[in-house]
């Protein structure tokens, strides 16, 4: 008979494929719903059928993952989400014109290799006879402290950081979704344990903890989807998916280690192999992310670089204000992923180089404003009447360029 963890493996693969597809379809719906503002601000995406199709695919994927957690440990199911990153990258290259080059294919291969290592060395699931045993794990001080930390950190990000930096840095919304998602996985596991035991003839719905796990899971999933949608609305699929995967997977592994007090592996070699699988998978996701950004930057430079420059934004690529200097080179603003915040001149942590660049950019803007005002004042001022032997500007016609000099007739 097939081991239960392999049943969970098959369901996790189906779920990853559906989730990877849903991210692309959801992005298409959010893009189509945008009417000058972010679609998640005015909730216009609720009227878009493409977005609902993406949500439908996401529900299918989450239900499949829900079943996978019933038969397999979270530490095996969650890393298989790397497959959703691969599926999302492949479909985005066809539907959203986000190119997948050679380096991207190498990243995909590393993701598959790392996931295979994890599957081959994944531990067996915890043996639980009642849902109250899972509740005992959840009430341990370590896991309660983790849940409290996630709650405080998410509230600070949502109400303190997101209003100022949420639209410029994807880490804000993705961090909230990842941390809250890790808690949801743990309580989903508790509820699926109750379902599995109930189907085996041991009714667990007589315990209040079963309903508590369901309520907490539902609340965390709603919060998780809300902030994942916000990140997808503002940034490209090939930027959001890899970061979200690494953040969500890392947080889930930490939560699982704290909840179950270890990996539950049979030997130290299996533990090392499992960690190696995580590292290989993370490297694959990182390389895939770099490949997507480099392809997007190259494509954007080819399209806009000759005219006005391209700034490598957090949405993959976006048009930026460019300026040609005296040598003909094009200077443009490039925004790195972890340096996307606006520079504050009063920030004591800013380096001297950053401050000099900030002052230079301000001086350039002031020069532009002065040139504009001069041009407008010249167009608005009345033209002097032509003098004898000169033109309308008072020039003598002898090649002089001093516009303020008039040639008057010599008195007799």
Image (tube, rainbow, N blue to C red):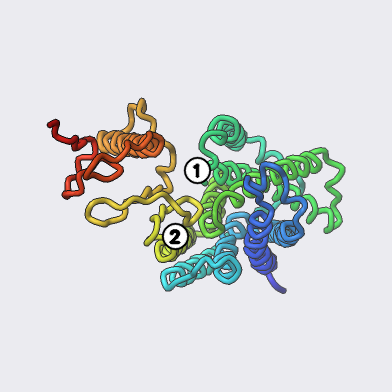
Q: Which residue was labeled with disc 2?
A: 293
On the image, numbered disc 1 is attached to which residue?
A: 168
Q: Quadrant of the C terminus?
A: top left
Left or right of 128 on screen, residue 168: left
90, 392: nearer the viewer: 392
Task: Tell me the quarter of the picture where residue 6 sits.
Answer: bottom right
Marks 2 and 1: in contact by CB < 8 Å?
A: no
Residue 7, x across and y down, in percent:
69, 68
Number of dots carrying numbers: 2
Are there few (<14), some (14-19), or many (20+) residues within 10 Å of tag 2?
many
Q: What residue lies at 14% left-to-right and 31% top-to-bottom?
A: 411
Task: Work out whether residue 400 or residue 397 is closer to the camera in this orientation and state it.
Answer: 397
Badge number at residue 49: none
Q: Whole-percent x and y of residue 274?
A: 49, 60
Quadrant where the N terminus sits is: bottom right
Name the residue at 81% across, 41% down.
211
Q: CA distance from mark 1 to mark 2?
A: 16 Å
Q: Earlier in the sequence, mark 1 or mark 2?
A: 1
Could you tell whether 76 is left or right of 100 in the image? right
Residue at screen point 56% across, 62% down = 85
Q: Is residue 350 visible?
A: yes
Q: Residue at x 23, y 44 (%)?
A: 390
Q: Looking at the image, which is closer to me, 87 or 325?
A: 325
Mark 1: which secondary structure? loop
């Amino acid at each position: 008979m097939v081991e239960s963890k392999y049943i969970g493996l098959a369901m996790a693969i189906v779920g990853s494929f559906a989730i990877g597809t849903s991210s692309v379809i959801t992005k298409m719906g959010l893009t189509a719903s945008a009417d000058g503002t972010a679609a998640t601000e005015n909730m216009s995406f609720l009227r878009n059928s493409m977005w609902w199709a993406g949500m439908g695919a996401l529900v299918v994927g989450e239900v499949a993952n829900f079943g996978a957690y019933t038969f397999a440990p979270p530490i095996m199911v969650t890393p298989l989400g790397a497959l959703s990153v691969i599926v999302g990258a492949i479909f985005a290259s066809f539907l959203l014109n986000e190119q997948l080059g050679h380096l991207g294919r190498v990243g995909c291969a590393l993701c598959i290799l790392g996931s295979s290592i994890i599957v081959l060395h994944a531990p067996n699931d915890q043996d639980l006879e009642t849902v109250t045993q899972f509740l005992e794990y959840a009430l341990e001080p370590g896991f309660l402290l983790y849940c409290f930390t996630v709650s405080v950190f998410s509230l600070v990000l949502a109400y303190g950081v997101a209003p100022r930096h949420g639209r410029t840095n994807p880490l804000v919304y993705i961090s909230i979704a990842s941390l809250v998602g890790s808690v949801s996985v743990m309580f989903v596991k508790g509820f699926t344990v109750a379902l599995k035991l109930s189907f085996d003839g041991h009714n667990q719905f007589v315990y209040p903890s079963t309903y508590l796990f369901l309520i907490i899971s539902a609340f965390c999933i709603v919060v998780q989807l809300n902030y994942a949608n916000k990140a997808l609305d503002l940034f490209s699929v090939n930027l959001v998916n890899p970061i979200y995967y690494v953040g969500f997977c890392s947080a889930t592994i930490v939560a699982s280690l704290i909840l179950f007090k270890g990996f539950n592996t049979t030997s130290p070699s299996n533990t090392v192999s499992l960690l190696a699988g995580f590292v290989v998978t993370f490297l694959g996701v990182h390389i895939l992310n770099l490949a997507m950004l480099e392809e997007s930057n190259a494509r954007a430079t080819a399209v806009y670089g000759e005219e006005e420059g391209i700034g490598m934004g957090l949405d993959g690529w976006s048009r930026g204000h460019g300026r040609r200097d005296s040598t003909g080179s094009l200077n443009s603003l490039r925004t790195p992923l972890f340096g996307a915040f606006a520079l504050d001149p009063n920030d004591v942590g800013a380096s001297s180089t950053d401050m000099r660049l900030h002052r230079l950019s301000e001086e350039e803007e002031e020069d532009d404003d002065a040139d504009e005002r001069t041009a407008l004042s010249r167009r608005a001022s009345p033209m002097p009447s032509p003098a004898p032997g000169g033109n309308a500007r008072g020039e003598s016609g002898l090649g002089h360029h001093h516009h303020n000099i008039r040639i008057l007739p010599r008195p007799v």
